[in-house]
Image (tube, helix red, strand yellow):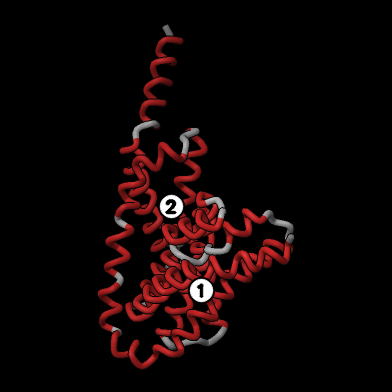
Amino acid sequence: MWESITDAFAHTRDQLFAEPSLWLCLTLLAYAFGMWTYKKSGYKTIFTPLLVAIVVLASLLLMTGTPYKTYMEGGQHINFLLGPATVALAVPLYEQRLRLAKMWFPLLCGLVSGGTVAIVSAVLIAGALGASPTTMISLAPKSVTVPIAMGVSQTLGGVPELTAALVVITGVVGALMCRGILALLCEKNDATRGFAIGLAAHGVGTATAFQMNRDTGAFSGLSMGLTGLFTAFAAPAIVPWLLQFFK
């Protein structure tokens, strides 16, 4: 009798954890918990909502033995909202159009230099540490948003799934470090701060930039989009050349 009850419970549990809608709800709850933790901590960077949500969900997936594919069947509905959310960044950016017209040249210089350094430094450091060519390629577009990074990685012969993970890690680390680094550099200009954050930490950094203020977030959103565009064209030209040094 007890065995049949145990088996029925295990079967019900497995069916529950295989249900995509459960993971959709748990994702929303994990982020809500992250927001609550962030506020309770006094807005300490280490308790960034996205980081807390990632830790909570990853722990749940490991404890329940749920494959990532099963999780994404529910999570894809949230992933779909990334498109409208990204487009919505154009609203605060439009409000800064007069400043953009005056700052186009320094912003262009920052984009080219920062985007190039992001690609070159990732490949060279990985190569110096003995990484395989595939890993180096997967690392190259780590500083741009996931859809663009995965496309660039796949085109060059990298592993898109590895690139996606590296992009998330880059964004989270950038969001954690950006306030401290900008304070250390004594940088006060909202445009400069936002552009630097978006260039280095894409969407996750942009969310942090909006927590600073609206202007910083607007320039971070601009930088995120332009960096993705620049990397899509620059990486295919730069990465094969860099790989020659490690043959």
Q: Residue at x 25, y 74 (%)?
A: 91
Can residue 240 be seen? yes
Depth check, front residue: 149 or 11: 149
**Residue 168 pos. (x, y %):** 49, 58
Task: Look at the numbered discs 2 and 1 and tell me whether their residues touch, using CB distance below 8 Å.
Answer: no
Label 1 sits on residue? 178
Q: Nearer the viewer, residue 228 or 38?
A: 228
Can you say whether 178 is above or below 6 in the image?
below
User: Does residue 245 appear left or right of residue 68 in this picture?
Assistant: right
Residue 175 visible from this viewpoint: no
Q: Write down the quadrant of residue 84 in the picture.
A: bottom left
Quadrant of the drawing holding the N terminus: top left
Q: Quadrant of residue 228?
A: bottom left
Q: Secondary structure at mark 1?
A: helix
Q: Is residue 115 above or below residue 108?
A: above
- Residue at (44% x, 85% y) in the render: 107
Q: Earlier in the sequence, mark 2 or mark 1?
A: 2
Q: How many marks?
A: 2
| Amino acid tagged 2 | Ala
**Which residue is identified by label 2?**
53
Q: Quadrant of residue 19?
A: top left
Quadrant the C terminus occupies: bottom right
Residue at disc 2, secondary structure = helix
Residue 213: image x %, image y %?
A: 35, 78
Query: Residue furthest toward the top?
Result: 1
- 204 w.r.t. 104: above or below: above
Tell me which amino acid carries mark 1.
Cys
224 sits to left or right of 155:
left
Left or right of 246 on screen, residue 56: left
Residue 48, compared with residue 72, is above or below; it is below
For the residues labelled 2 and 1, the Cα–Cα distance comes to 20 Å
